Structure formats: structure tokens, C-alpha cells
Image (cartoon, grey):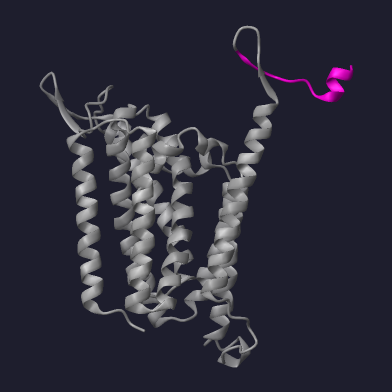
């Protein structure tokens, strides 16, 4: 069931107005959001996404609603993974906490632009070349492997060469000047370190866009649902960054949960490719009828279960590690001896 054009236009208009309002609030009142403020904003965007899913159910039916929720949760989990790299970028460039909101918002806008481009390209490829599902599936399985066995430092280092090249060719001030990218100091025009931050965030967003778009096309082929799921996943990401804070470093097993989700969707895409097969060297160019078709409902259940297991396991591991520490006589955290050490 196709969604009405008026509904798609109205949805994009409303979402654009919300993003503009959020952007104006940030640049008019730069500040460090409190835990309460961040919690309220994150909750608002989550409830807004669920309300949108309800409206989709009324306008487009059960399948469209389930596809959106599954796609939104997939993109949300991948967006949370972005936060690990964002933390590294903010730390490496020593961005003042007061101005991190502006930097994050620019990063989110860049992410929306990049994902919008890849969504349009992906939709055209799917419409014209059914065999692209084989490539998407293989790419997601490969991405799952690298996600599980590479560190976030490796991902963040991908833009180092570009930034090093820019530093050698343009004048950059030593200090930040709010969220300004270019300033005049002693009569000389020069860029601020914020330019490097924006470039680092942009290149990171580009890498994540390449990973995330094939993943959501494994859930739904509707470009409207793909794009709105990405918008809702990125909305509230800035507040989530401040809400999680140091907790981000404790989510040790999150990358394995995300890797499992990517691998699962990759396998689902491969099965779907078999169902619409047109490659002459596979089953004589005919669809493979015996290949299982994974439903959206099952995909949603797997995504939720994988994220819950990863988060709970991470928190349990963090708590167990915390219990192994005690405060020493000088107020420092010390590791308690193990049983075999104490016996000796």
C-alpha cells in the first residue's frame, strides 16, 4: 500500500520545522544541557517517533508501521555507535563542552545530507538492478565483521590524513571562538579549530552513511520510510550524547550487538536476493523459491533482542568491574586482589 503524497509532504514539512527549531535553540543559547534536560529531549524524540509509527499504521497499514519501527531501531542503534567516535573527536580536538552542542548539530545535519544522497542512489539501484541485494548483503556481513573486530579509534583515524593535509595549507588559530569557523586575529583572517571538528564529524558521518543505508534497505524498500527512519534516529542524538556521558565507554558489548544486527540483515538481504534472482549463473536466472523469507516482525524482534542483550551484558560487566574496585586510603580507586593473589 503506497503512502499518500500529501502525507509524505506534510511529514517532511513538520520534521524540517522541528529540526530548524532545534537548531535555533542551540545557536541562540549555547550551554551544557543538564541530565534532566537531555532526558526530556531524548524522551520527546522517542515518543515522537512512536507517534509517527502510529500515524503510519492509520495511513499506510500495519506493514508500513512495522517497517518504520524496525528501520528506526536499526538506524538508532547505528547512530548510538556514532557517539563513540564523536566522543573521540571531541576529546582529540579539545572542544569546549559549552560548544559541543553546535558541533554535534552540524554533524547531524551533515549526516542527514549524506544519508539523503545515499538513499536516493540506493533506491535507484534497487529499482533497476535486483542483483544489488547480493552486494548489499555481502557488504553488511563484511561490515559486521569489521564492527566486531575493530576499535573505534580505527574508525576515527580515517580522517587524520585529510586533517593533517589541511593543517599544512591553511592558517588555524590556537583557540576556539565559540562556534565560529573563521575569525580575524591581529588583522589576519584565519580558521578556528572548529573547522577541523566539522570536517572530522563530516567524514565520520560519510563512513557511517555508507554502512547504515544498505542496512535499512534490508528492512524496507520505501525511500520515504528509509529517510524518515534516519531523521528520527538522528533527532535527539545530540541530547543522547550528553545524557549517556561516561556511560558510553561502559557499553563494551554494544559493538557486538550492532555487528549481529548487521550480519542478520545481510543474511536477510541475501535470501531476498535469491527470491528476486535474475543472475543467469544462479538457478538458471530464475527466483529461488526454497529460500526463506524473513518477515519484518521477526527482524524487529531480533533487532530489539540483540540491543537488549548487548546493553544489559555491558552494564553487568561494568558493574562487576566496579565491584572489583575499592577506595584506597588516599581516596584513589584500587583494584581488589583476586583470590589466588590474596592466598599468596
The image quarter in which residue 11 lies: bottom left
Report if residue 343 lies within the magenta region: yes
The image quarter in which residue 213 lies: bottom left
Q: Where is residue 323 in the image (x, y as percent from the top left)?
A: 68, 27
Q: Position of residue 53 (x, y in %)?
A: 38, 67
Q: Nearer the viewer, residue 146 or 43?
A: 43
Residue farthest to the left? Answer: 187
Residue under the point 10% across and 21% down: 187
Report if residue 34 lies within the magenta region: no
Residue under the point 60% across and 57% down: 306
Indicate whether 322 appears above or below 20: above
Residue farthest to the top? Answer: 330
Residue under the point 50% across and 75% down: 133
How many labels, in total?
A: 0
Residue under the point 27% across and 22% down: 175
* Camera sees residue 118: no
Q: Quarter of the image containing the N terminus? A: bottom left
Give the side of residue 32 with respect to residue 70, left or right: left
Please state the extent of the stretch shown in magenta in the rendering: 332-344
Q: Position of residue 239 (x, y in %)?
A: 36, 42
Indicate whether 333 appears above or below 292: above
Give the side of residue 317 with respect to residue 244, left or right: right
Indicate whether 337 appears above or below 321: above
Q: Where is residue 24 in the image (x, y as percent from the top left)?
A: 18, 43
* Camera sees residue 286: yes
Q: Quarter of the image containing the C terminus? A: top right
Amino acid at each position: 500500500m503506497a503512502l499518500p503524497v500529501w502525507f509524505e509532504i506534510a511529514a517532511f514539512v513538520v520534521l524540517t520545522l522541528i529540526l530548524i527549531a532545534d537548531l535555533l535553540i542551540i545557536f541562540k543559547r549555547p550551554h551544557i544541557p543538564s541530565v534532566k534536560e537531555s532526558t526530556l529531549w531524548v524522551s520527546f524524540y522517542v515518543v515522537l517517533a512512536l507517534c509517527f509509527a502510529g500515524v503510519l499504521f492509520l495511513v499506510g497499514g500495519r506493514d508500513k508501521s512495522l517497517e518504520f519501527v524496525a528501520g528506526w531501531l536499526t538506524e538508532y542503534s547505528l547512530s548510538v555507535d556514532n557517539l563513540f567516535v564523536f566522543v573521540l573527536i571531541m576529546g582529540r580536538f579539545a572542544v569546549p563542552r559549552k560548544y559541543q552542542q553546535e558541533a554535534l548539530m552540524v554533524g547531524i545535519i551533515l549526516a542527514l545530507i549524506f544519508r539523503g544522497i545515499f538513499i536516493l542512489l540506493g533506491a535507484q539501484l534497487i529499482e533497476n538492478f535486483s542483483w544489488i541485494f547480493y552486494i548489499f548483503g555481502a557488504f553488511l556481513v563484511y561490515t559486521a565483521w569489521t564492527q566486531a573486530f575493530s576499535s573505534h579509534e580505527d574508525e576515527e583515524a580515517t580522517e587524520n590524513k585529510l586533517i593533517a593535509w589541511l593543517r599544512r595549507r591553511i592558517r588555524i588559530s590556537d583557540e576556539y571562538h565559540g562556534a565560529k569557523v573563521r575569525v580575524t586575529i591581529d588583522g589576519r583572517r584565519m580558521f578556528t579549530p572548529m573547522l577541523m571538528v566539522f570536517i572530522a564529524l563530516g567524514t565520520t558521518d560519510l563512513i557511517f552513511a555508507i554502512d547504515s543505508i544498505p542496512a535499512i534497505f534490508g528492512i524496507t524498500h520505501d525511500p520515504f520510510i528509509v529517510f524518515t527512519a534516519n531523521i528520527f534516529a538522528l533527532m535527539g542524538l545530540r541530547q543522547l550524547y550528553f545524557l549517556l556521558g561516561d556511560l558510553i565507554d561502559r557499553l563494551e558489548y554494544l559493538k557486538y550487538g550492532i555487528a549481529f544486527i548487521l550480519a542478520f540483515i545481510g543474511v536477510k538481504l541475501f535470501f531476498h536476493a535469491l527470491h528476486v534472482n535474475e543472475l543467469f549463473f544462479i538457478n538458471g536466472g530464475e527466483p529461488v523459491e526454497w529460500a526463506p523469507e524473513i518477515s519484518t516482525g521477526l527482524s524487529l524482534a531480533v533487532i530489539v533482542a540483540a540491543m537488549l542483550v548487548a546493553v544489559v551484558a555491558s552494564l553487568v560487566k561494568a558493574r562487576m568491574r566496579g565491584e572489583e574496585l575499592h577506595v584506597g586510603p588516599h581516596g584513589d580507586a584500587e583494584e581488589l586482589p583476586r583470590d589466588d593473589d590474596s592466598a599468596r
